[in-house]
Amino acid sequence: MAKTNSRDRMSNEINAGSMADIAFLLLIFFLVTTTVVEDKGITVKLPPWSEDEVDPTKLKTRNVFSVLVNASNQLLVRGEPADIMQLRERAKEFIMNPRRAEDLSEAPNKAIISLKNDRGTNYETYLEVYNELKGAYNELWNEDAQRRYGTDYSDSMTREQKKAIKSAIPFVLSEAEPTTFGEE
Amino acid sequence: MGKFSKKRGKVMPEVSTASLPDIIFMLLFFFMVVTVLRDSELKVDVVTPSATELTKLQEKSLVNYLYIGKPKDNFKDTHGTKPRLQLGDKFSTVAEIPLFLERHKVKVPENKRARITSSLRIDGKVTMGIVQDIKTQLRKTGQLKVNYSAKQKQER
């Protein structure tokens, strides 16, 4: 009699202590099978494929900012060896041409950046150069947005505002077919 | 007076663990929401370089991943040590890119197809040769939106 009594009392509640363990197991399973991907990067719009190469010699040389990266990751900016640390500043100066120099771009919307690399160039170096050039444009867009609307260039701006800035300072970066000197 | 002390003495002070599962479940759901299921095993070593001008990829379903890097140690015997391209979960050649992109494309609703982005997860040590071949192939295929995957650079 006493035994059944105790059984009745026991069955009244389910032991929830193991629930935590089960949930932990699930949690650990998900932690193992999933990854936190850092989905960040430099977004680039590639030019559409066309068979005939654009001839850069048709452009005025003063409007072209040529950057060459060779197979040993050295930089040649407008025909002279250069350091990557100064690339951003030089690109900015070239695009805006604040002192109206004769050899820099006529206007920001006429400036063209030409990037050429070798098949043996390190991807890291290439991306670093690309990052600097993109950074130059981003900084210029920010400055322009500050001047016009008093805010930084960001996604919160209206479409018209963005369009106005992008038409004043368009991002034109042409990438030539690479040379094949230093491929491994 | 006596009444209170008697009661306290009888009942053992115990922390209730009934809410523990709920807390763990909350953690579980948090992780389920913020993470993505690993869809493919990486067979190449990829250490992406760091950069400052980053944009975040918005919709994960609109992104396809191309991995480029040297084969991991256990694949060196069969696939060599030169940088290789990995599509999905297998080693591929550049010529297989169009089919791979098409396979991803049919899973995306038609009105969103213009926003499909290719995420290039490329090891920093890779030379540009293979990267260039892949870029050319992407351009020929008409996949022009590309994201060079990179980490946030700490100092400027």
Image: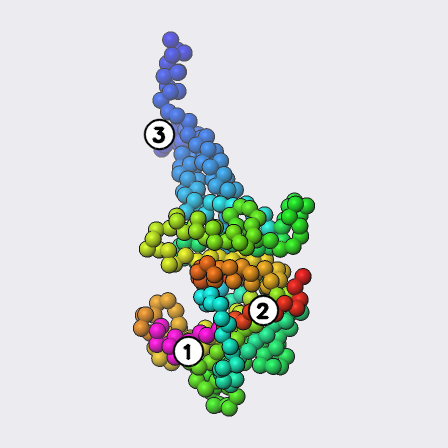
Residue with the mark numbered 2: A178
Residue kind at label 2, given as amino acid type: Pro
Residue with the mark numbered 3: B3
Q: Nearer the viewer, residue A174 or B61?
A: A174
Q: Visible in this render: residue B81? A: yes
The disc at residue A169 is 1
Q: Chain of mark 3?
A: B
Relative side of A1 to A85, left or right: left
- Residue at the spot x=54%, y=71% of the render? A176
Query: Gap in Å between the C-alphas at discs 3 and 1?
Result: 83 Å
The magenta stretch spans which residues? A162-173
Disc on the earlier residue, 2 or 1: 1
Query: Gap in Å between the C-alphas at discs 3 and 2?
Result: 91 Å
- Residue at the spot x=32%, y=70% of the render? A159
Secondary structure state at the residue bearing disc 2: loop
Neighbor class of circle 2 (other Cα within 10 Å; few <14, some 14-19, many 20+) is: some
